[in-house]
Structures are given as structure tokens and as C-alpha cells.
Image: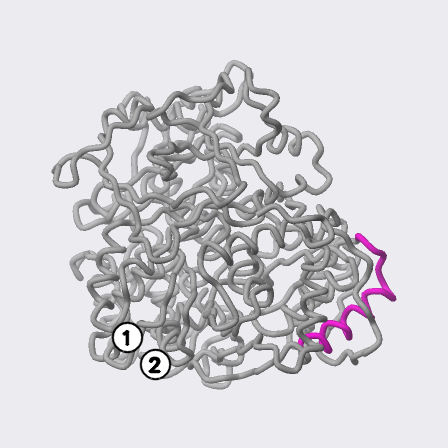
Amino acid sequence: MNNPAGAIESLLLPHILQQRANSPDDRWSYVFLDSQGEQQCYWTAADLAARTRAIAARLERVTSPGEPVLLVFQAGPEFLAAFMACLWSGRLATPINPPRRNRLVERLVAVAGDSAARVALTSQDLMGATEGWRQASADLGALDWIPTDSLHDEPGLAPARISADHIAFLQYTSGSTALPKGVRVSHGNLVEDMMRMQSAWALGRDSTMVSWLPAFHDLGLIFGLLQPLYSGCASVQMAPNAFLQKPLVWLSALSRYQGTHTAAPSFAYDLCSRRIAPEDRSVLDLSRLVMTMNAAEPINPAVLEQFVADFEPYGFRREAFAPAYGLAESTLAVTANPVGAEPVLRRFDVAALEQGQVRILEDGAAEGRMMPGSGRPLPDVPIVIVDPETRRRCPPHTVGEIWVGGPTIAHGYWQRAEETAATFGATIAGEESAGAFMRTGDLGVLEDGELFVTGRIKDLIILGGANFYPHDIERVAQDAHSALRRDNGAAFALTSQTDGGREQVVLVQELERTQRSESPEPIIQAIVQAIWQNLELPLAQLVLVAPGSVLRTSSGKIQRLANKRAFLEGSLPVIARWQAMTAQAAPSVSEQPAQASGPDAAALTAWLRSWLADRLGLPVASIEAGRGFAEMGLDSLGSTELAFALGKQIGAALPETMAYDYPTVTRLIAHIVPDGRDDPDGQNMHVAKSERMDASAAPGADLDELLDAIERGQP
């Protein structure tokens, strides 16, 4: 896999695009589908090169080489042209998804400020929205916003002089809006990673990639969008929202275009099983599928088995599943399940695992935890398992931190020397000659050459494919009510024992001393609602504790793992406890339900209560019209499904943020069937037919909270 420097230089993406554009028989093509799966755009390499040169020429006039440039686009072909224009001109592409609501503009503000970009590329249809963004931040207001749609080709513009070590783009890790980190990915990193993925997963000129993953994060960008350009195969793309609205669109595209390669997190396969009716599956032909990467969040073995059972009759093969592990700091891929090999599943002894040891049980053993492997290390990508405290190599069958090396490791974080040294410059104690490794912060073990990821050292919470940082959750909660102590909370994730092993979020929060005797219900309600509306995240459990109860280190840092253990052991001094509604437990806090406003509202209310009961596995009687969706335990994916289902019921497409903006059945129905009571000042924009969002007109209106972090590649 080692390549001379000159060979790598000739394989850099701008040069590959130029060569393909000049070759009449080149097989690369780009198709973009609308929300109904119909072809909206078709580009050849020559078409892409023309759009790339047009944008690159403008960048050369208004920016300097090596300068970050923000890319703020909805899903579609203009994003690809803008990204390639940055590489073509030697600028640093900095992808960032456009905010869907003003409340979610903070991430764009943070990335603009951290990157110090002076220019943002966007599309003409987003220029109206930029006015609101400019007003939200001085950094956004100072940007030169350039719509790329109408720029003209400059055929003589050649790619800039770039080398493999030059930085190609900044991949901002997701989660925290306050402290974004831009991973510096070089042109050489990209080539090395795509070269390995091409070999591992048998990509070639006759392949067809079908992807709905967001292009502003590395799995969708590098594997879904850039890999076809590198490998020279057809690329069929659609917006994430198209898949979320109608999962059949993804599998239909795989059938129609004879797709051979695709990727998605575990929840997507679950969504297909639940949302694609048996009668709609009969038209599918998935027999051409060589591999479908299963990555970006923990793989649920039950979901894997259900998908195989549901779609094997239509050509899907179990060995097409390709679990993988990777992260932005390693460009993308670290391990891969090779083509033609079934996913590796092993049953782990839970008691041993809790002690950091690995004991594999027999396949038929009733006890234990079934865990999927993440594949084997890619060639020349060394993985070592290290004790994170001693930094010594762990003995066999011992869980430790996953450290990664090799040519795909990125060049560190943008403008963050200390964090770069800490993450990218790790050496194994006693084996310093082995060189520097990148610390992933993930825990795992290598068994017979297969990587199993068992947990995380980092506090990062991955829920529904999205990354959440605990300090963001804690900050929003503490802002929700004056009774809460600042910097005295701990958010962490627990694995549900009753919900298919999915992660759930728990918050332990201290009360002010003067507020201990106050009624906890309004405080709990304020916290649950604030986290739901600001982070689009459902809490599973909330515990209010006495002042001084949240555990800290000797230096004053919150010990989230210690607080998690205390929570599980029941040793916290609890003042009040709340749990989201489940089939087993009802919440202790609710608001009084309001009356329906009329026959239409009453019918819609009854329908929505029934839909929620079915979606959440609850009795209809427990779905009170005035109770918050967050209290019911509706997650981000469920809120999106709600908007789609309700839109179908009323015959119009609704924004997927409806459940956050109108967070009870009563308020949502009053917004759609207005009677004036929910909006006494007449300020609401009710959903008249002329105002309803056309989903096909906004194909890239994808989910921040659901897809913000499809970059991790965990099994």
C-alpha cells in the first residue's frame, strides 16, 4: 500500500477530476434525486469540472491560498462543485450544514469564529436566510456570502500547485457548539484513505454508489461523495430528508440504479424495517449490493438480524453488511469488514467486561452480551490497545483505549496546538520507538485480529447517530431555571435494558440551597422542555440532588463516570426524580390537557394521540394532549416521523421541526387548525396551504440533531 510521493501527487482529487473531465470515455457520473426519487440532476466529469473552475476562479480573486472557506449548502450538486473548487484553488473547504432554525445557528457561529473564515459559499436559494444569520452574529455578518449558482466557467484555469501534505479541508467534529474543533485533513490523507477503502470494499469503474448521508460530515463526504470520484464509478445522491421522509426512496434507488455500495448508521436499517410496508418491498432488487457499511453509531445486532430477515427475500445478502470503525481524526476509515465476509458477532461475558477483561462465551449461551466486530485494520493502519492511565500496551484479552497510526491520520486540529499534541502525539510507554499514535478516546479490544469497540473514555454521547457533549446538556439545563446551581450537573448515557439496547440520556443536577424546599415539578418541566427545544434531545431520566452532591475530581472537574456509578448504585441524595414515559413507567410531571377546538381539531388530536401511542408503545389513555413530547420520550427521529406522518394526514409537507416548535399535542394541533387560543397575539404563522413547506423544494433540509455526527464509524 506504500506509494512513492510522485504517485500520490498524481492521484490528488483536483488532478483526478481534471483527468476524468478530459477523458471522453470516463465512467464517473453524478445523479441527484429529489424527495420522490426522481432524477433532478445529471453531471459528467466535464460538467463538474466546469462548475468547479467557475467557483475556483472567484475564490482566487477574493481569498488567499490556504485560507478556510465556509461551505453552507443544502444537499445537492452545488456543494460538490464548491468543495472541489476549494481543493482546485488550494483553499481549505470548511463544510457546515445550514441551520434549520434560528435557535440552531450557534454551531455555524462557532465554526465561523474558530476557522476565522472571511468568505462563505452558498446557493442563491439560501441568500435570503443569510440575512437572519448575519443579524445573529458579528462573525456571520462580516462574512462575504457568495452564491455559486451563476458563476461562469473559466476553461483555462488549471488546479493550483498543491502537494500531498497541503491541507485540503477542515472537518469540524460535531457535538459541542461552544468548542468546535476543526480536523486538518490533507490531500494525502484523502488519497490514502480512499485507496484503502477502494481495495477493502472492491470499488471500481463498474460500481455504483448510492448515498443519502449528509455531505458536511466525513462518512457522507468522503465515502458517499468523494470515493466515487476517486474510483471512477457512478454516484447517485439524495438528501437525508428524502430518506427520513420515505426510507423506500433509498432502497428503490439501490434497485433502480443497480447500486453496489452504500452506507448508513444502524438506525437507518431499523427505519427501513419499520417504515417500508411488505407490499412495497416486492419491487425491490438488492441483489447487486456488494456492501453496505454499517457505521456511525453502535450497531444493534437485533436490527441487523431483522433487516436481513425482511429484505433477504428481495436479494439482500447478510455478507453485504460491512461494519466499520473510524473517526474524523483518521480522515475516515480505520477498520473494515471485507467484501464477501459475514459480520463477526461474538457473545461477551458481561461480568468480565465490567472488569476490563474479555471472555468469549459459546454462541448458544443465554447470558452475556452479543457484540458485533468492526472489522480488521486497514493495511498499514496499526491499531494498539493501550491502558489510558499508564499508557502501556494492554495484554491480550484486556480492554483498553484504541490508539491508531498510519498515513490516514490527519494533521491535527486547526489552531489548537495543545489539543493536537495530546490527541495526535501519543507514544506507548516503553515503546517510544514505535512512533506517535492518535488517541481515539474509545475503548476496545482486538480478538483474533477483529476490533470490538466496547465503550468510550470520552464523555461524548451518541444518540440516534448524533453527537452530544455533556457540558452542552448541562449548560442548557442550568439556564432553564434559577433554582439550579451553575456548573453543578452531570449528564451521561445509559444503555436501555428495555429498548433494544439503545442509549438514553440521564442528567443529575444540583439545586441551590435556597430552593430545596420548592416544588420540583416546575423545575423538572423547565429542564426537560429546554433540553428538548434547544438541543432537540429527549432526556430519559432526571435527578435533582442536594447541593454538593455531584461528584468532582480534586481539581474541581465533574466526574461524570463516577456520578453515573453513584446513580446506578442509588447512592445519590435525591430530592426529586423524573423519568420519561415508557410502557412501564409514567412521568410524575404533566400539564393539564386543553380541550380540542372543534371537529377538525378533535379528529386530528385523536389521530395524533393514537399515532404517538403506537410509536412509543404506550396506552392511548396515557397520551394527554397537554403533555410535552419530551416527557413522553419522543426522540429526534420520532419527532421527524411525527412531522412526516401528520403532513401526510393533512395533505401537506410540514417542517420536521414542528414537534420542537409546538411541543405538545394541543399546541401542535392549534398551530395547524388555529382557533386563536394558542396565539393570543396573533403572531404564529399558521400552516395555511400557501405557507406549507414543499419538501421537494428544500431537498437538503436535513436533521442537525439526527445526522450531525455521522462521522464516527463505530459498530
Tell me where residue 178 appears, x and y as whole percent: 61, 42
Tell me where residue 438 appears, x and y as whole percent: 57, 34
Lateral position of residue 157 relative to residue 546, left or right = right
Q: Which residue is mark 1?
A: 604
Q: Which residues are magenta?
A: 48-66
Q: Is residue 125 visible?
A: yes
220, above or below 489, in the image: below
Q: Is residue 103 visible?
A: no
Pointer 1 or 2: first along the chain: 1
Q: Amino acid at mark 2?
A: Ile
Give the secondary structure at mark 1.
helix
Label 1 packing within 10 angstroms: few (<14), some (14-19), many (20+): many
> Which of the two marks, 1 or 2, is nearer to us in this view?
2
577, above or below 173, in the image: above
Q: Judge by depth and name the residue closer to the eye, 183 or 324.
A: 324
Q: Which residue is mark 2?
A: 650
Q: Are the residues flagged by discs 1 and 2 in contact, CB closer than 8 Å?
A: yes
Q: Judge by depth and name the residue closer to the eye, 168 or 247.
A: 168
Q: Is residue 472 magenta?
A: no
Give the secondary structure at mark 2.
helix
Q: Residue at 34% across / 79% down in the picture?
A: 648
Q: Residue at 44% across / 19% down in the picture?
A: 548
Q: Judge by depth and name the residue closer to the eye, 515 or 359.
A: 359
Label 2 packing within 10 angstroms: few (<14), some (14-19), many (20+): few
528, above or below 607, in the image: above
Q: Amino acid at mark 1?
A: Leu
Tell me where residue 670 appears, x and y as whole percent: 38, 71
Magenta highlight: main SS: helix
